[in-house]
Amino acid sequence: MTSNVSNYNVDEIRRDFPIFEQEVYGKPLTFLDSAASAQKPQCVIDAISDCYSNEYANIHRGGYFLSQALTAKYEASRETVQKHINARSSKEIIFVRGATEAINLVAQTWGRSNLGAGDEIILSQMEHHSNIVPWQMLRGEKSFDIKVSPIDERGNFLLEDYEKLLSEKTKLVAITHVSNAIGTITPIKEIIKLAHKVGALVLVDGCQALPHMEIDMQDLDADFYVFSGHKMYGPTGVGALYGREELLEKMPPYQGGGDMIRSVTFDETTFNDLPHKFEAGTPHIVGGIGFAAALDYVAALGFDNIHDHEKTLLDYGLEKIKEVDGIELRGQAEKQAGILSFTMETAHPHDIGTILDQDGIAIRTGHHCAQPVMDFMDVPATARASFGLYNNTDDIDRLIDGLHKVNRIFA
Ligand code: PLP
């Protein structure tokens, strides 16, 4: 199938991803779980393999050829991330294990030194647990309040209600750009503007946004923006925290160890410059390089093309899923990413997942690490099909056939 989008040939793109050469239970692999983790193109696999085969050494401290060459490549990867999100400086890009670590870093450094009794932070109803639990853990010690910004029953973020929560007590707004559980794209620019009006900082969880849209830090004006490499067609175990340089400069370090120091005596330690102040220990060197390869791959395909292709898939999926009896879509916001989250009258989400799996169709079932939004929707779990840049309408047709089969089995 060739996408409607001119010069975006999804058949060719699928050939970049070796995983699609395999069959599952003798059926073609229908991978609809990219929101959990995306598949990897050959260029990312090659970048990782080349690095271990030909370029590998520890970085930053070695005076010899391999170490210096790989240090330069790792730092060039940081610049690739910086350019990808249009940050002002590569000092603003902290390599971390992923979005979860990035949020914990901000909670334990900025949060620990800036939040206290009488302060408030605002999260949204649809946050991933990784943007709830780190703040709750800190609240246990620092006694600030957590306010929850509501959504409507379709999953739309309620901007006016959010505005009412903001006050001079609000020190931080920590909100997702795109919900992993129900697909809502939040009005993040307005959210940031309104927070800044009351002097609050904004942390954006960009995990689900980065793979689907162009992200521009200078345009968004977020204070912190976090994301994971593995959802962006890159390796696991690597991601980034973007932070405004003046904030990062003032924040204390996160973990202590090698690389994050300038000098150490038993009496005193002085810390390294940004970004190294926040990167204790040997980093995921090869991960950073693989991540940059993934960003280059996605950029070469073009975000307008990816967006148009995924929008075509979403519209097709939304239309086709109506044909299935007893489906209830959970999350039908006006602005929606390529995620179909649903329940069925006949079967529990886990049963739906099991039946589909038998036909080689991989979807995610459960609470998607977002229990508060499941509670709000009054369901314990949903079935979630999520699209990546390599999905096509055949994938959706197979999903729909599978859902009809679920109805036949459980009717
Ligand atoms: N935030 C969102 C919206 C997510 O979807 C996820 C992962 O599913 C995370 C944060 C956590 O990402 P990671 O597990 O890569 O740290």
Image (cartoon, grey):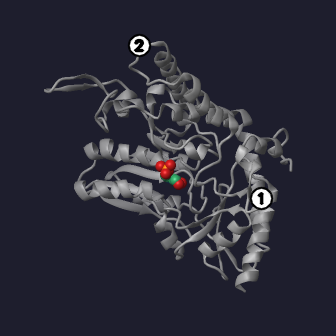
Residue 177's spot in the image, x, y percent? 54, 50
The residue at 76%/48% (across/down) is 21
Residue occupied by mark 1: 395
Residue 333's spot in the image, x, y percent? 63, 62
Q: Secondary structure at mark 1?
A: helix
In contact (CB < 8 Å): disc 1 and disc 2: no
Q: Secondary structure at mark 2?
A: loop
The single residue placed furthest to the bottom in the displayed view is 411
Earlier sequence position, callout 1 versus callout 2: 2
Q: From the viewer's perspective, is residue 198 above or below residue 272?
A: below
Asked if one can make out residue 297 in the rendered structure from this viewpoint, the answer is yes
Q: Quadrant of the C terminus?
A: bottom right
Residue occupied by mark 2: 63
Spatial CA span between label 1 and label 2: 51 Å
The residue at 38%/61% (across/down) is 147
Q: Is residue 79 left or right of residue 277?
A: right
Three-letter amino acid code at disc 1? Asp
Q: From the viewer's perspective, is residue 266 above or below residue 310?
A: above
Task: Determine crowd level at label 1: few under 14, some 14-19, many 20+ residues with C-alpha closer than 10 A.
Answer: many
Q: Nearer the viewer, residue 334 or 198?
A: 334
- In the image, the residue with mark 1 has its CB under 8 Å from the nearest atom of ligand 1: no
Q: Nearer the viewer, residue 129 or 315?
A: 129
Q: From the viewer's perspective, is residue 275 above or below residue 114?
A: above
Task: Determine crowd level at label 2: few under 14, some 14-19, many 20+ residues with C-alpha closer than 10 A.
Answer: few
Asked if one can make out residue 199 in the rendered structure from this viewpoint, the answer is no
Give residue 234's quadrant in the image.
top right
Three-letter amino acid code at disc 2? Gly
Residue 156's spot in the image, x, y percent? 58, 62
